Image (cartoon, grey):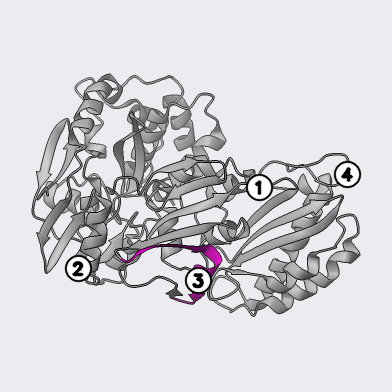
Amino acid sequence: MRKAIRFLRKGKVVELDQFEPTTTLLDYLRLSERSTGTKEGCGEGDCGACTIAIGRLRNGELVYEPVNSCILLLGQIDGCELVSVEDLEGPEGLHPVQQALFELHGSQCGFCTPGFVMSLFTLYHANKPGLSRADVNEWIAGNLCRCTGYRPIVDAALEACCSGLNDAFSARAEQTREALEALHDEQDVLVGEDAGFFYAPANFQSLLDTYAEHPDATLVSGSTDVGLWITKHLRDLPKIIYLGRVIGLGTCYEDEQGIRLGASASYAVAEEFLKTIDPDLDVVMSRIGSKQVRASGTVGGNIANGSPIGDMPPMLIALGAEIELQSNRGRRNLPLEHFFIDYGKQDIAENEVLTSISVPRLKSGEHFRAYKISKRFDQDISAVMAAFCLTVKDGVVEHARMAFGGMAGVPKRAGGAEVAIVGARLDEPDSWVHALSALERDFSPLTDMRASGAYRQKVACSLLEKALLELSDQSAASMRVHGQRAPVFGDAHVN
């Protein structure tokens, strides 16, 4: 058992053995280090003013990812390198990203600028070949500036990030890699006492034993949800159990059946596997939060929090995903759709931990479509999330799985519509009518600030019709915002 967290800072190892379990990384930087270049904006991971970079080893390779320090807990950076805006300028001058922003007038009032700098620093180190304007826009979607426009910021990114790596961090990458490897022990980490602690087990059995002993502890994976309990709800969470160091819990791999995601795998890791199942998964996942959110947030956390408007559960339900739950009493598997019982209620017993998600690949004749409807395109909560998995043979629907978010108190299948669509022909829209009518009876959506119940009902029906049109007609598929999908009925077949 190690009694302190350890991380790399400015080339040196920092050890901290005393801090409150809910201390955020932003508070540590500003209040303890007095590194005030990192700013606090929204305090909920939306505006990006607090963005810093975290260096991690991934498959032996050093990667830098942007994260929102306002909702990331200090203890979560154990074993990582912490990079803030103060670290970029060296004896030779400004970092290439900073120099480009200066020369191309990419800073307006300046409050958001440190966050932009750090996001572009991680883009610089991603070293993407053929970087485009669209790539930059996607990368900085989690950084908000309200002074003027983004054109000079994007210009600066294209100027700085297209010339290869040539900064102090790339020059000492091998030393950093060796230092991070030295930090990666397999010890459990405990800071605090029984009454209040930050606990980061490395061993899975240690996790189960401690959770059984402290059932009142809060499990934290990415902290993109729990972080808001702290900063916005001001909740007192004296006992934190962090899942990010449990060996194997963040592992993703592919087998004969499909994709298996460790419950603590971040979206940044999981999306590389899931997008191989179908392009629509990639499109929707690129709109879940921001780069900062996806670098921290986890698919397992998105499921475990039981949100009725989470984007991933409807897609996973439509694909027939299963989850594994485990405690000291044993393990069990269940279809993901059965995990959600009612609003705020999930099928998870005391001391049970969600450990993995299994997602099958599409079988021959199966076709997947997914759509997210929100007021903003980037970084917004869904009004309606719809996912369809239809089995089609000779232009006839033989089987269907349809799942929706935002239409009920839980992510839910449209059972009536699934039955009614069987036998419908893709080239005969009149045969779809019964399914569209059944879908109206499957849900009684609520009205809230995101959408009215009537709007949600109409959108859900329209999305089912859109999916059927896309499967049958290339002209409908070509109207997509993101690329084109080939039809499955007519001259072309399969995705």
Label 2 Cα crowd, 10 Å radius (few <14 / some 14-19 / many 20+): few
Residue 101 percent across, percent down from the top left: 38, 32
Q: Is 36 situated left or right of 316 in this image?
A: left
Q: CA distance from mark 1 to mark 3?
A: 23 Å
Residue 56 percent across, percent down from the top left: 30, 36
Task: Residue type at mark 4: give it.
Answer: Gly
Task: Residue type at mark 3: give it.
Answer: Phe
- The residue at which mark 2 appears reads as 213
- The residue at which mark 4 appears reads as 490
Task: Residue type at mark 1: give it.
Answer: Leu
Q: The C terminus appears in which quarter of the rendering?
A: top right
Q: CA distance from mark 1 to mark 2?
A: 41 Å
Residue nearest the observer in this picture, 249 or 448? 249
Residue nearest the observer in this picture, 44 or 178? 178
Q: Residue drawn at (75%, 48%), measured in percent from left and top?
A: 365
- Callouts 2 and 4 close, C-beta under 8 Å: no
Q: Residue 330: say if magenta.
A: yes
Secondary structure under the numbered disc 3 in the rendered image: strand
Position above or below: 324 against 97: below
Q: Is 419 situated left or right of 39 in this image?
A: right
